[in-house]
Image (cartoon, grey):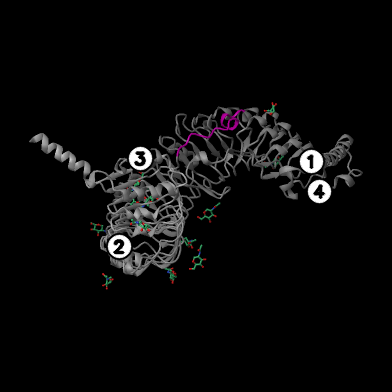
């Protein structure tokens, strides 16, 4: 009896239609496979003679219906088959991070079963498509179509059928037109609308006020305009409001109604007015980004009440007044404070030095004044400090105070301490972790100080625009990580020391160890923002000094160099041939010296050279006219009376008479080249002709 029932069960199981996935589901899946131009090896597992519930990436339920199709990061290429819409039990479809192309079949968006659809990071094109207005309610909850190539406007009727939608992520596409005007009218649980990095324009729709469950609204990096509508301030569920880099204008009044805000990012817009006193109501606020706007006025006292703040970024506005109104001491979670380029006055408020978690403090380009307080030593985690152009005085004391900051990696002190003297006796045991040091444009007198040789991790040193005298010290090559040195525009003297040609980082092409700036740094030469020092180019800038002697041949060892500027000195002798070994060079400026002799022809080997200047020297001979050289402007060569070539007034033939030191062999040489070229052309044409003739006769 028991064995009979077991057999019966077995029999029922074997003949039951639910014992395997249905032929129809199998064939829908195989439709996807056969449509792909690359299947990432799926064919091995997706075999027609096996149960599709056992195939890779597929999960079935007890009824042997396919519920999950998870094929993220499989290297799939080709279109997504609309036949997947026939999998009536499918709940989750994840095709993220493949190379799928063509459109997103509407059958999937409007599927009567799919809850989660993730096709992000593909190359899908076309629009989202309207659903027929008769479409019955659909269960889709999560739609991630971000990082594709979708275009066109957002359809309106899609939303009406999507009563269950919770998340729509359409960031990083090419959508145009307005934001969806009423995304929540039919979806009461709608919580995440992410539209950043598209080409949306128009206003922020008032219809958002119906989104009573919306937690995240992201539409940064679009072309949105107008003011923040007051209807937006009714969406009190909002926790993350992120609309940076649009063209939004007007004031922030009303923002304090969004008392659940954790992130407020409105940077890079055209907002004006001041930060309202009511900002203190945003008790949960952690991230405040209002940088690059036109905001003004004083910072309100109530900012001290936002005690959860981690980041305050107000750079590039016109905020003014003294900072003493704000009690920074109550912002004990603050890690980053960026006030770059505003109009704050007075002294740096002492209460900042109570923010013991602070890692980055940028106060530069504000008319503060006075001396740095010793209390800054309390900021034990401070890694990035920028005080450039703050009208500070007493560099000796400033360096002495900062030298004990063990965490400091990046220090900007430029445009301060005018006409003081570079201190020579900063404590030996200092700045152990300093990687980036700017003491530029301070008109400091004195020498390049020896204490710099004790900074074992220094990678970038900028001391241009001072009045430093004396030679480049020999210890320079002991700075093993130094890859960018700018001491231009000083009064330094002596020869270019051989030590400078032995700098380990400049000799090698390896990049500096990768660390990140706590705040992004703008480099005006490259017109770029940098997140890490290692992204800065390897550079040597000795311009505008009084260096004498020859350019050492050993300069050819600095294979890593990207930019070499020796201009406006009193260097003499020839341009060493070895300079042609610097094959990574993109910028070479030797102008304004007393260099003589010919331009080394091998400079043509510098294929990356895009800026080149040898003007105002005593160079002679022919300007190479091939390769890179044909791309440089005439001004690169001017002010060398004995140079000849098509770029300068002296044309080589006619200049012979007036030029004293024309090399006759060179003349013959260039004629010989013309001859050889003509011969070469003749030769090649001849050979081709011969082959054609031969082919006609024998082919
Ligand atoms: C499956 O889907 C395709 C495309 O959506 C449709 O043309 C076809 O009729 C469907 N097949 C079945 C058996 O439902
Ligand atoms: C889809 O898969 C990727 C990769 O495994 C994962 O990161 C992503 O979270 C998944 N999407 C959803 C909606 O779960
Ligand atoms: C797509 O978005 C959903 C919802 O935000 C998320 O769960 C999923 O991880 C995202 N997919 C990827 C690949 O990031
Ligand atoms: C949107 O998707 C992208 C992946 O393309 C992901 O990085 C991001 O976190 C998602 N945003 C939200 C709010 O889910
Ligand atoms: C949407 O919100 C407005 C007020 O902001 C209200 O008058 C309207 O009834 C709401 N519509 C729906 C469908 O909830
Ligand atoms: C942004 O929108 C304005 C009109 O509002 C238009 O003139 C401008 O060309 C748009 N900019 C971009 C980059 O699309
Ligand atoms: C802000 O800009 C608007 C125009 O966008 C202007 O009407 C208003 O006067 C400005 N307010 C302030 C305080 O500058
Ligand atoms: C800051 O918060 C305290 C206590 O919650 C309150 O008494 C005070 O009025 C608030 N200050 C401002 C300026 O909002
Ligand atoms: C900076 O503030 C001062 C007053 O403190 C004012 O006179 C000056 O015009 C302001 N500068 C700018 C650029 O706003
Ligand atoms: C320093 O800042 C002041 C304003 O605070 C500005 O006028 C001046 O141009 C700045 N100096 C430099 C060199 O940028
Ligand atoms: C270089 O030295 C000369 C003569 O000693 C002096 O006149 C000139 O000002 C110096 N130039 C610089 C930039 O220091
Ligand atoms: C320059 O390169 C050539 C060949 O590439 C090599 O023979 C020569 O030694 C190099 N000179 C220097 C100074 O590195």
Residue 110, numbered label? none
Looking at the rendered image, the disc whose residue lies closer to the viewer, 1 or 3, is: 1
Q: Which residue is mark 4?
A: 646
* Label 3 to label 2: alpha-carbon separation: 54 Å
Q: Secondary structure at mark 2?
A: loop
Q: Which residue is mark 3?
A: 378
* Label 4 to label 3: alpha-carbon separation: 64 Å
Residue 162, numbered label? 2
Q: Is residue 473 above or below residue 337?
A: above
Corner quadrant of residue 127: bottom left
Decide: few, some or many residues near mark 4? Use Cα within 10 Å; few <14, some 14-19, many ≥20. Answer: some
Q: Is residue 507 above or below residue 121?
A: above
Nearer the N terminus, badge 4 or badge 2?
A: 2
Residue 593 placement (x, y as % from top left): 73, 40
Q: Is residue 511 magenta?
A: yes
Residue 461 placement (x, y as % from top left): 54, 38
Nearer the N terminus, badge 1 or badge 3?
A: 3
Q: Hey, which residue is sitting farthest right in the picture?
A: 657
Q: Quadrant of the N terminus?
A: top left
Nearer the N terminus, badge 1 or badge 2?
A: 2
Residue at 40% over, 34% down: 406
Q: Which residue is mark 1?
A: 695
Mark 1 vs ligand 12: CB under 8 Å? no
- Residue range (magenta): 502-515
Nearer the N terminus, badge 4 or badge 3?
A: 3
Q: Main secondary structure of the magenta part?
A: loop
């Amino acid at each position: 009896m028991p064995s009979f029932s077991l057999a019966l069960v077995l029999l029922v199981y074997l003949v039951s239609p639910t014992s395997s996935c249905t032929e129809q589901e199998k064939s829908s899946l195989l439709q996807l496979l056969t449509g792909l131009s690359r299947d990432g090896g799926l064919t091995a597992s997706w075999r027609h003679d096996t149960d599709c519930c056992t195939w890779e990436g597929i999960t079935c339920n007890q009824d042997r219906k396919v519920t999950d199709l998870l094929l993220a990061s499989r290297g799939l290429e080709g279109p997504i088959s609309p036949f997947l819409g026939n999998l009536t039990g499918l709940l989750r479809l994840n095709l993220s991070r493949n190379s799928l192309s063509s459109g997103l079949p509407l059958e999937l968006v409007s599927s009567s079963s799919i809850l989660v659809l993730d096709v992000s990071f593909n190359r899908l094109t076309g629009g989202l498509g309207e659903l027929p207005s008769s479409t019955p309610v659909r269960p889709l909850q999560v739609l991630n179509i971000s990082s594709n190539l979708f275009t066109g406007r957002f359809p309106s009727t899609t939303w009406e059928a999507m009563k269950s939608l919770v998340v729509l992520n359409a960031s990083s596409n090419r959508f145009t037109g307005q934001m969806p005007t009423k995304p929540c009218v039919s979806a009461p649980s709608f919580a995440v609308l992410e539209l950043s990095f598209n080409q949306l324009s128009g206003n922020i729709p008032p219809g958002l006020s119906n989104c009573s469950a919306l937690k995240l609204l992201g539409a940064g990096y679009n072309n949105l305009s107008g003011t923040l509508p007051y209807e937006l301030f009714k969406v009190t569920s909002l926790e993350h409001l992120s609309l940076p880099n649009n063209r939004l204008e007007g004031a922030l009044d009303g923002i304090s109604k969004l008392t659940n805000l954790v992130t407020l990012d409105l940077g890079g817009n055209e907002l004006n007015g001041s930060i309202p006193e009511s900002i203190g109501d945003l008790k949960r606020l952690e991230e405040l980004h209002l940088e690059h706007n036109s905001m003004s006025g004083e910072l309100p006292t109530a900012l001290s009440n936002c005690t959860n703040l981690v980041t305050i970024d107000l750079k590039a506005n016109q905020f003014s007044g003294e900072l003493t109104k704000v009690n920074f001491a109550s912002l004990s979670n603050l890690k980053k404070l960026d006030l770059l380029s505003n109009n704050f006055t007075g002294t740096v408020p002492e209460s900042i030095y109570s923010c013991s978690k602070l890692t980055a403090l940028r106060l530069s380009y504000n008319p503060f004044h006075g001396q740095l307080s010793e209390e800054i030593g309390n900021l034990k985690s401070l890694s990035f400090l920028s005080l450039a152009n703050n009208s500070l005085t007493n560099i000796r004391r400033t360096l002495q105070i900062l030298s004990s900051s063990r965490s400091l990696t990046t220090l900007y002190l430029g445009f301060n301490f005018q006409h003081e003297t570079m201190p020579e006796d900063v404590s030996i045991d200092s700045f152990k972790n300093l990687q980036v040091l700017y003491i530029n444009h301070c008109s400091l007198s004195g020498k390049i100080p020896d204490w710099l040789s004790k900074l074992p991790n220094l990678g970038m040193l900028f001391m241009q625009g001072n009045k430093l005298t004396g030679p480049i010290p020999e210890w320079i090559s002991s700075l093993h990580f130094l890859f960018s040195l700018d001491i231009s525009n000083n009064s330094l003297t002596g020869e270019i020391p051989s030590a400078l040609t032995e700098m380990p980082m400049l000799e090698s092409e390896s990049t500096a160890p990768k660390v990140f700036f706590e705040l992004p740094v703008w480099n005006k030469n490259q017109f770029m923002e940098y997140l890490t020092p290692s992204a800065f180019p390897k550079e040597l800038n000795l311009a505008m000094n009084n260096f004498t002697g020859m350019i050492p041949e050993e300069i050819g060892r600095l294979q890593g160099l990207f930019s070499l500027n020796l201009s406006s000195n009193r260097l003499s002798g020839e341009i060493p041939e070895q300079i042609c070994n610097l094959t990574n060079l993109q910028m070479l400026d030797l102008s304004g010296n007393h260099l003589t002799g010919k331009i080394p022809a091998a400079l043509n080997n510098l294929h990356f050279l895009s800026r080149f200047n040898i003007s105002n020297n005593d160079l002679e001979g022919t300007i190479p006219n091939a390769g890179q050289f044909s791309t440089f402007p005439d001004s690169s060569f001017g002010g060398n009376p004995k140079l000849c070539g098509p770029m300068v007034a002296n044309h080589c033939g006619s200049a012979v008479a007036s030029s004293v030191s024309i090399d006759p062999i060179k003349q013959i040489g260039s004629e010989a080249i013309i001859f050889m070229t003509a011969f070469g052309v003749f030769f090649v044409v001849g050979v081709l002709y011969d082959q054609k003739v031969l082919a006609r006769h024998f082919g």
